[in-house]
């Protein structure tokens, strides 16, 4: 395998797995540690990858259509649970995200009593626009096409003026530092949404735990609960307990722990 072929294959692996270690790459390509480290240095130069001690992580943004299909079953489990805790006459916020999009789809296909849904997502608005039991409110703002999200100062000011019972917020990563996302404009809106609601639920599939994205938009103790389909480490559960953050793990049968 030539150097260019190896770099292309390495790029595919890192994108698929979000992060990969030097050790794993050495074993996969059957080359030296030094060769892999040189490859990682070259890969980092394209701006979509960041090296860390012992490996490299993908920091670019996949197309929305790709992200919507990733971990789709996990997102559906989360969406079913979230829909089950939405009560009649609730005012809820759904931010722009692939898991919150699944919540909107689940709501559209469920028997619901009247609820008000506030969103900054064009895709979520399109799903709910014809649902009779949903009073739909959209914020204004600048459209970020990569995520179908409305962002910017107009969106930020809008969320400063409202109050909701519940907010369901997506995230790009969860670590002890808090919740993070790739885009600063979307991070600002997520922060405003959390401040605008009584109860806040971070919705996250299993890939988000232990991953630090570019912009930390909120600390762990800023939310009521994290809803996920992932089994996380005992150490991280202890961290959440210390900060008073509840973890809800849901699976295919809607069991939780």
Image (cartoon, rainbow, N blue to C red):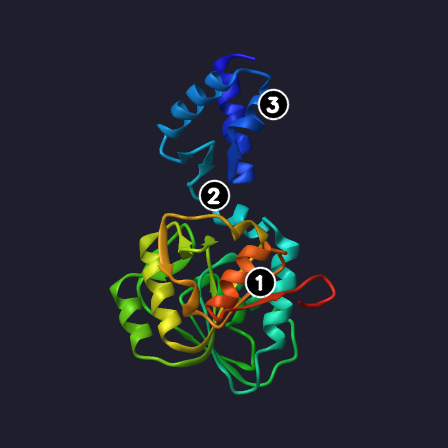
Report the side of 12 relative to 95 (left or right): right
Residue 110 is marked as none
| Image quadrant assignment for residue 156 | bottom left
Instruction: Label 2: state its secondary structure.
Output: loop
Report the side of 183 relative to 97 (left or right): left
**What residue appears at the point 56 percent right and 22 percent down from the top-left corner?**
26
Residue 27 is marked as 3
Q: Which residue is mark 2?
A: 62
- In space, the residues marked 3 and 1 are separated at their CA atoms by 38 Å
**What residue appears at the point 25 percent right and 64 percent down from the top-left corner?**
153
Q: Which residue is mark 1?
A: 102
Instruction: Label 1: state its secondary structure.
Output: helix
- In space, the residues marked 2 and 3 are separated at their CA atoms by 27 Å
Judge whether 100 appears above or below 46 on screen.
below
Report the side of 26 relative to 93 (left or right): right
Residue furthest toward the top? 2
Residue 21 position within the rendered picture, expressed as x and y whole percent measured from the top left: 52, 32
Tag in front: 2 or 3: 3
Residue 200 in view here: yes
Count of number-bearing discs = 3
Residue 234 position within the rendered picture, expressed as x and y whole percent measured from the top left: 59, 57
Residue 126 in view here: no
Q: Dot 3: few (<14), some (14–19), or many (≥20) neighbours within 10 Å?
A: few
Mark positioned earlier in the residue sequence (2 or 3): 3
- In space, the residues marked 1 and 2 are separated at their CA atoms by 18 Å
């Amino acid at each position: 395998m030539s150097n260019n072929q190896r770099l292309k294959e390495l790029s595919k692996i890192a994108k698929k797995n979000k992060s990969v270690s030097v050790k794993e790459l050495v074993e996969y390509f059957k080359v030296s540690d030094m060769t892999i480290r040189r490859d990682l240095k070259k890969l980092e130069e394209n701006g979509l990858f960041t090296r860390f001690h012992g490996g490299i992580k993908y920091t670019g943004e996949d197309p929305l259509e790709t992200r919507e299909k990733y971990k789709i079953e996990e997102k559906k489990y989360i969406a079913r649970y979230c829909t089950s805790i939405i009560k009649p006459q609730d005012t809820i916020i759904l931010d722009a995200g692939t898991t919150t999009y699944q919540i909107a789809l689940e709501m559209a296909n469920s028997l619901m009593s009247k609820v008000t849904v506030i969103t900054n997502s064009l895709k979520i608005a399109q799903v709910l626009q014809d649902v009779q039991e949903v009073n739909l409110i959209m914020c204004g703002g600048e459209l970020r096409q990569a995520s179908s999200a409305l962002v910017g100062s107009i969106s930020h000011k809008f969320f400063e003026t409202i109050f909701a019972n519940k907010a369901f917020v997506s995230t790009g990563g969860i670590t002890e530092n808090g919740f993070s996302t790739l885009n600063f404009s979307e991070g600002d809106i997520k922060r405003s949404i959390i401040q605008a609601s009584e109860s806040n639920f971070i919705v996250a599939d299993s890939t988000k735990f232990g991953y630090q994205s570019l912009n930390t938009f909120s600390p762990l103790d800023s939310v009521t609960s994290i809803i996920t389909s992932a089994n996380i480490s005992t150490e991280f559960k202890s961290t959440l307990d210390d900060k008073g953050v509840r973890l809800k793990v849901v699976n295919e049968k809607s069991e939780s722990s």
